[in-house]
Amino acid sequence: MVTAQGPAHWLLDEADDVGAALVLGHGAGGGPEAADLAVLARRLPPLGVTVARFEQPWRTAGRRVAVAPPRLDEAWSEALPVLRSALPAGLPLATGGRSSGARVACRTAAATGAAAVVCLAFPLHPPGRPDRSRAVELLAPAVPRLVLQGTRDTFGGPAEVRAAAAGDPGVVVVELPGADHGYRLPAGAPFTPADLRDRLVAEVAGLLGAGPARSGADGE
């Protein structure tokens, strides 16, 4: 599709018996093929959730540096109505993303009519700069927000996110033990990559009211 920011790209994984849809945006350091986005795209459709991954125009154009937040928001906000028009009428549509993609989803939740927001590694602040908090973005939506945060995330760990969201019952923070901002785990950690994938799928499926997640459903 073409946006005011240039051509963009969708990756669509459709559920046969769809009950909800989830649109995910990527971060500033990667694309829609990111492992956490990909596992949700593989394992949620069998549970009745259609998953769409949006590639921002800057990434589609082959550029290495993300554009400014207003331009990200504009492209995302243009693309969502196009996707929504292709889905069954009245289907609940949640939005979300990884890192900066989660920020975009939070900032635009009201304008896009999101039913919920999934935040994968929400970057609460730049590493080492807790004074530059982005909590206002996380707190902006009036819909449920699920934050899946690694305990080694230098952009803000689960405790920091909980403190920033204190008093907002719409924010649920789930810890990913040992995971960093990219959801990488230390070698030999008791919480394994398979555990992390299972927790991601189970928590997001629960938010969307989907069926029970099946461990290993993607063959990993």
Image (cartoon, rainbow, N blue to C red):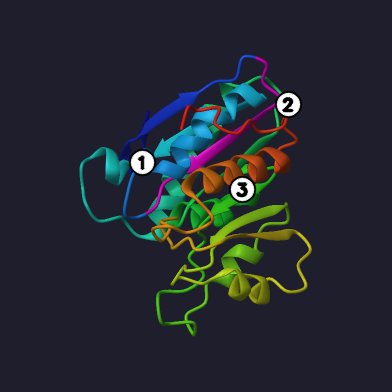
Circle 3 packing at 10 Å, graded few (<14), some (14-19), many (20+), is: few
Counting residues from the N terminus, which is met first, the one under dot 2 or under dot 3?
2
**Magenta stretch?**
17-27
- How far apart marks 2 and 1 lie (CA) works out to 27 Å
Q: Name the image quarter holding residue 45.
A: top right
Q: Residue 47's x, y, as percent?
A: 66, 26
Relative to 83, 167 lies left or right: right
The kind of residue on which mark 3 rests is: Ala
Q: Is residue 85 above or below residue 197?
A: above
Residue wearing tag 3: 111
Q: Secondary structure at mark 1?
A: loop
Q: Is residue 16 above or below residue 140?
A: above
Q: Residue 67's x, y, as percent?
A: 31, 56
Q: Residue at x 51, y 72 (%)?
A: 156
The kind of residue on which mark 1 rests is: Ala
- Label drawn at residue 59: none
Residue wearing tag 2: 90
**Depth check, front residue: 71 or 185:** 185
Counting residues from the N terminus, which is met first, the one under dot 2 or under dot 1?
1
**Depth check, front residue: 217 or 114:** 217
Circle 1 packing at 10 Å, graded few (<14), some (14-19), many (20+), is: few
- How far apart marks 3 and 1 lie (CA) works out to 17 Å
The kind of residue on which mark 2 rests is: Gly
Residue wearing tag 1: 4
Is residue 19 located in the magenta-colored stretch of the structure?
yes
